[in-house]
Amino acid sequence: MQQLAALDTYDTIGVVGLGQTGLSCVRYLLSRGLTPVVFDTRSAPAGLAALQELDPDIEVHTGPLDAGLLVEMDLLILSPGIDTRLEAIQLAQDAEIPLTGDIEIFGAAVSKPIIGITGSNGKSTVTRLVGELVQAAGRKVAVGGNIGVPVLDLLMSDAEDQVEIYVLELSSFQLDLIHNLKLSAATILNISDDHLDRYATAQDYAASKQRIYNFTRTAVWNREQRVTAPRDLPLDQQLSFGADESDAELPGLFGLHQQQGQPAIGWNGEVLLNASELQLTGIHNLLNVQAALALVSAVGIEPPSVVEAVRQFRGLPHRCELIGEYQGVQWVNDSKATNIGAAEAAIKGVRELVPGKLLLIAGGDGKGADFNQFRDALSQVDVLITLGKDGDRIAAHHPAAHKVGSLREAVAVAKTLATEGSMVLLSPACASLDMFRNYEDRGEQFRQAVEACHA
């Protein structure tokens, strides 16, 4: 695809998808005096009322996409939730209608350094931590993308002119629509099977993630998974992190050391800080911290200067979040684990910290994942409690599985089976939409059920 032309050179712009990202695209276009035509595959999209508040006269088409209307557009801006394999989108592409996304438009509009973060798991944690480290270094930062604030909304903020560094969480769907972005640093944190309802194979999904390195000056990758390494960048444009010790030479400047029998984060061949100083738990989070430090080092922030900010970072809600401890049993909310890799990281990360039984609550919409790949992690679980659309598929891989019909029932069963020193971990390995509004709703209902059970 050619470089995106100035938006005002297109006569008719279509915005496809009326979710949070689509609405932000419409807001941005209207702010520039451009009125798009809006499309959504749903007959009554939730964003319709908000759209009409923006412009009651805007042209909107809902329901199955009409290829005849799409090919009348000069440019199509697709939301990440729109599957580019849809026949109408394919026909528009065949008709040489340019397809783009909000990230590409954002990249064309800014000249400040951008840090891009992708991966199957840990993106939001690392994105938020990088933002806090940049801020701790005294530099004005804006954080957005897939983490919650659409990137084009960042451009419309009153403080935008003062921003020195942008930190963006990028999904594979967003990366698919990028062709000319310039990143100062970028990472693929890890890759596990996810979104196989949108990609033909796991290799296609990994290739989508790899696109991020096509646009970066410095690549930060995970030595535990060589598939996260860039294929073409020279070594002096690489930084890596991992569970082995750090080196004093590129690219392996970040790693894990042992200090008096306890893990410690290393930088440049030396211990930087002990894991016991962090408010995050689990080996997976020690890798996340290394990735964040590597990314900020790539934009000139020395890791020792932001160690205190790492110590103070509490992590994100619904991500290995301790809800409470009752009768010696810890209850942990990891509802944001919406795929196998995320749940696997949580299980392996906490297993060594649990002296008693580890009880796992899992299930939901598996999005086509192969749960055979979950066997190794499940073997570290003492009791498995499953629910939701694909709960039975997960239960088939564990000898001590209990099937339940609701999250409240799962909590009640866990309470009867947990003993002192145990941990009950909600880490579903599945999306939530078969039973809940979103993963936040699932996590909040878990919290409420745990608190009610111990009231």
Image: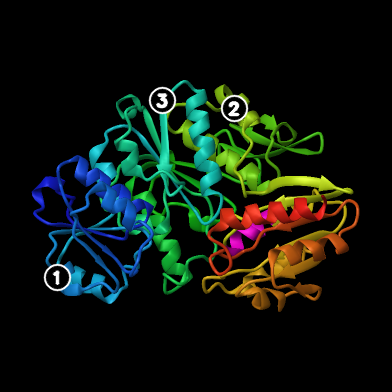
User: What's the residue type where badge 1 is placed?
Assistant: Ala
State the image coordinates of residue 257 (x, y, percent, origin top left). Answer: 70, 38
Magenta span: chief secondary structure: helix
User: What's the residue type where badge 3 is placed?
Assistant: Lys
C-alpha span from label 1 to label 3: 43 Å
Tell me the residue at 51%/48% (across/down): 123
* Quarter of the rendering occupied by the N terminus: bottom left
Tell me the residue at 36%/55% (across/down): 174
Image vertical order of residue 441 relative to residue 236, above or below: below
Q: Which mark is residue 140?
A: 3
Q: Nearer the viewer, residue 450 or 283?
A: 450
Give left or right: position of 343 versus 187: right
Determine if the magenta segment contains residue 204: no
User: What's the residue type where badge 2 is placed?
Assistant: Ala
Residue 282 visible to the viewer: no
Q: Which residues are magenta?
A: 339-346
Task: Kindly state the secondary structure of the residue where label 1 is placed.
Answer: loop
Along the polypeptide, which appears first: circle 2 or circle 1? Answer: 1
State the image coordinates of residue 111 (x, y, percent, origin top left). Answer: 27, 33
Q: What number of labels is visible?
A: 3
Q: Which mark is residue 95?
A: 1
Along the polypeptide, which appears first: circle 1 or circle 3? Answer: 1
Residue wearing tag 2: 309
Along the polypeptide, which appears first: circle 3 or circle 2? Answer: 3
Residue 111 visible to the viewer: yes
C-alpha span from label 2 to label 1: 51 Å
Task: Kindly state the secondary structure of the residue where label 2 is placed.
Answer: helix
Tell me the residue at 37%/45% (across/down): 150
The reply to whether dot 3 and dot 2 touch (C-beta < 8 Å) is no
